[in-house]
């Protein structure tokens, strides 16, 4: 973490402040935030006035687990990556949030420290709302409260799935599984699947809770077996059934990590 840029939240705060200040604090619009779609134009305008508006450059850290900020953040433009790091420094990807999404609701609700780090995946425009205002919004609007509950339920389910994968699958199998999750049917070639744009090996490794070297070995051996073929920024999966079989086998054909 020491090699990453200083948090834009921490950098802009004085010891007495609990909310972010931005160099450009001009107003913005929350009209594209899906969580707030049931609010009237008047209520949305009031909420916009309660927000602090800030910009983050691609690669810039927005939040880390050590910061004291407890605001919820709305992604007005751009996207952010939510991730964590093991004691050895290995990156574990949790999620990516794009325009219209939000993050930071856990700390806003329970007042406890951040559970993950957030980095701008691309240049972003963000709106930060104080936890007290957000909690009052939940009390006043049942639709928003239910939407947040639905998201938290999805997080629990995803965590359960990750725990099961870590307990039952080898590192290679987790990579197979991640490739299957990212693949889509090829609109041109029948019975063929593809991943476009193909994420970096480091990104796939973070999603599969393994190392970049393991992902490289998997892609190489899948190519040798004619199961998958990489061309430029696209990975073509020629034998999706074989890939699924590799993922489901108790003892993978390829050596485990």
Image (tube, grey):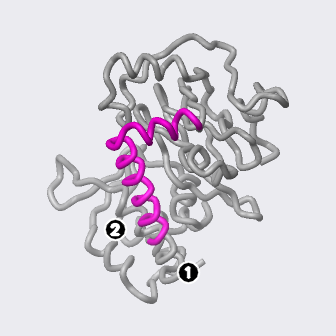
Magenta portion: prevailing SS class: helix
Image quarter hosting the C terminus: bottom right
Q: Nearer the viewer, residue 109 or 175?
A: 109
The residue lying furthest to the bottom in this view is 251
> Residue 207 placed where, x, y %?
52, 59
Q: Residue at x 18, y 47 (%)?
A: 187
Instruction: Tell me the residue that label 2 is attached to.
Output: 227
| Residue occupying the point 17% across, 61% down | 191
Q: Nearer the viewer, residue 224 or 237?
A: 237
Q: CA distance from mark 2 to mark 1?
A: 18 Å
User: Is residue 146 magenta-colored?
Assistant: yes
- Judged from the image, the secondary structure of the residue bearing numbered disc 2 is loop
Examine the image and state in which quarter residue 247 appears: bottom left
Give the magenta range.
132-160
Q: Which residue is mark 1?
A: 256
Tell me if 94 is positioned left or right of 222 in this view: right
Q: Residue 16 colored magenta? A: no
The answer to whether 124 is drawn above or below residue 157 in the figure is above
Residue 102 percent location from the top left of the image: 48, 38
> In the picture shown, does residue 60 fall above or below 251?
above
């Amino acid at each position: 973490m020491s090699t990453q840029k200083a948090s834009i939240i921490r950098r802009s705060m004085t010891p007495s402040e609990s909310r972010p200040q931005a160099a450009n604090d001009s107003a913005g619009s929350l009209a594209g935030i899906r969580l707030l779609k049931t609010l009237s134009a008047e209520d949305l305008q009031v909420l916009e006035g309660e927000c602090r508006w800030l910009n983050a450059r691609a690669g810039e850290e927005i939040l880390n687990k050590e910061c004291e900020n407890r605001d919820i953040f709305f992604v007005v433009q751009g996207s952010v990556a939510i991730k964590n790091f093991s004691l050895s420094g290995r990156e574990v990807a949790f999620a990516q949030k794009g325009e219209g999404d939000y993050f930071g609701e856990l700390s806003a609700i329970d007042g406890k420290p951040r559970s993950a780090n957030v980095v701008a995946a691309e240049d972003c425009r963000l709106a930060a709302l104080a936890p007290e205002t957000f909690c009052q919004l939940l009390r006043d609007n049942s639709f928003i409260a239910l939407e947040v509950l639905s998201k938290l339920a999805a997080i629990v389910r995803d965590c359960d799935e990750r725990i099961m994968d870590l307990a039952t699958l080898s590192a290679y199998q987790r990579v197979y599984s991640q490739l299957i999750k990212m693949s889509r049917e090829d609109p041109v070639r029948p019975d063929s699947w593809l991943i476009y744009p193909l994420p970096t090996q480091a990104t796939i490794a973070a999603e599969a809770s393994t190392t970049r070297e393991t992902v490289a070995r998997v892609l190489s051996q899948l190519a040798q077996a004619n199961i998958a073929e990489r061309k430029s920024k696209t990975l073509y999966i020629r034998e999706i059934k074989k890939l699924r079989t590799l993922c489901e086998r108790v003892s993978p054909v390829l050596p485990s990590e």
